Amino acid sequence: MSRYKISEEEKAYLEQYDIAQFERPSLATDMAIFSIMEEGERDNFRKLPQKALKLLLIKRASFPFKDSWALPGGFCRPDEDVYETAKRELYEETNIKNAYLNLTGTFGDIGRDPRGWIISNTFLALIDGEACNLRAGTDAWEAKWFSVTLKRIEIKKEVTEEIVDMETEYELTLLHEDAGICLSAKIKEYKQFQNYHETVRYEMLDCENIAFDHAKLILHNLLFLRKSVENDFKMAFDLMPETFTLTELQTAFELILGRKLLAANFRRKINDYVAETEHFLEGAGHRPAKLFKRNIQEFYR
């Protein structure tokens, strides 16, 4: 395939073109970084530790929203695409490299940032949080993992021959028990199916100490994660360490989906995607548990 060549006529057009004739927004990236991690201190070493779905937040050191908690992120540089910005900001603020990153949406509501017209490209990131070493950067006082709880209340569902309208209210709670920090938000989701297409928008009803519109971004990414794992559960493996027990893997799925799973059904579905190792998890429960790893052959089909 030949590369596009700029003609002399087009060069002349570009030389006189004034890009400043249109107002331009600032571009930013914000990352919802999820992990499955131990919850609190272990009080019984004969039992498996409790696990929780956790989200990484930073405490803002400067205005706007000084001292509020926000998703890691920052502004795009002229020599970067949005993925490069996300990777750079992720490392600068949290010391995390090589995380799974997926661009899930763009948020540009009027008034979302008091500094002006700023459009956020929001990313979903999945990591093994136990293996990372947090390092809050210059834009953050500190970085902490918060346990995530999401409550769903269906408010309205109207179905006609051509249109389905749904309104759902979500209560988001982010808790750091050791530090005594509890953040919360109520968000309404408006979803419409028309002409075989889905449109979604969010309305913030209430928000406690979460910066900007980041509660919307958190909800959006959590729902994206749940839907993705329902359709292609390979994504959940990005939350796991190199080796894991089947119980740990099932727990990760349950925490993501927000419901219990039947062990027999779950193990049948994931059987082809895991491979046994020769190692066992020692020191918990009555019997050592077999450790598994990803079956890479199935992941790259």
Image (cartoon, rainbow, N blue to C red):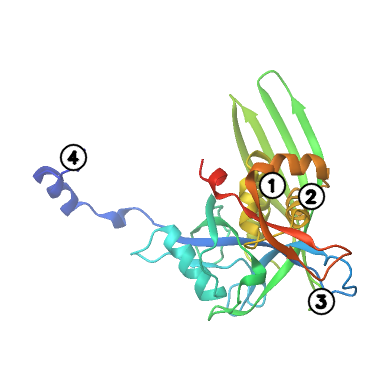
On the rendered structure, is 188 left or right of 40? left
Query: Does 65 sit above or below residue 148?
Result: below
Give the residue number, with chain letter if any, for mark 3.
180
Give the residue number, with chain letter if any, for mark 4.
2
Q: SS class of the residue under badge 4?
A: loop
Mark 1 residue type: Arg
Residue placed furthest toward the top: 161
Q: Position of residue 69 (x, y in %)?
A: 67, 71
Mark 4 residue type: Ser
- The CA distance from mark 3 to mark 2 is 24 Å
Evaluate if marks 4 and 2 touch, with contact meaning CB atoms under 8 Å apart: no
Q: SS class of the residue under badge 1?
A: helix
**Quadrant assignment for the N terminus:** top left
Evaluate if marks 3 and 2 touch, with contact meaning CB atoms under 8 Å apart: no
Which residue lies at the image location 74% right of the left edge and 24% below the top edge? 159
Task: Tell me if mark 2 has few (under 14), some (14-19) or many (20+) residues whose alpha carbon lies within 10 angstroms of its own.
Answer: some
Q: Nearer the viewer, residue 153 or 113?
A: 153
Q: Is residue 197 visible?
A: yes
- The CA distance from mark 4 to mark 2 is 51 Å
Mark 3 residue type: Gly
Q: SS class of the residue under badge 3?
A: loop
Residue placed furthest toward the left: 8
Q: Earlier in the sequence, mark 3 or mark 2?
A: 3
Task: Please tell me the numbered disc located at residue 258.
Answer: 2
Q: Earlier in the sequence, mark 1 or mark 3?
A: 3
Which residue lies at the image location 42% right of the left edge and 64% below the top edge? 76
> Residue 44 is drawn in which quadrant?
bottom right
Give the residue number, with chain letter if any, for mark 1.
226
Q: Is residue 208 visible?
A: no
Q: Position of residue 277 (x, y in %)?
A: 66, 57
Task: Tell me if mark 3 has few (under 14), some (14-19) or many (20+) residues whose alpha carbon lies within 10 angstroms of its own.
Answer: few
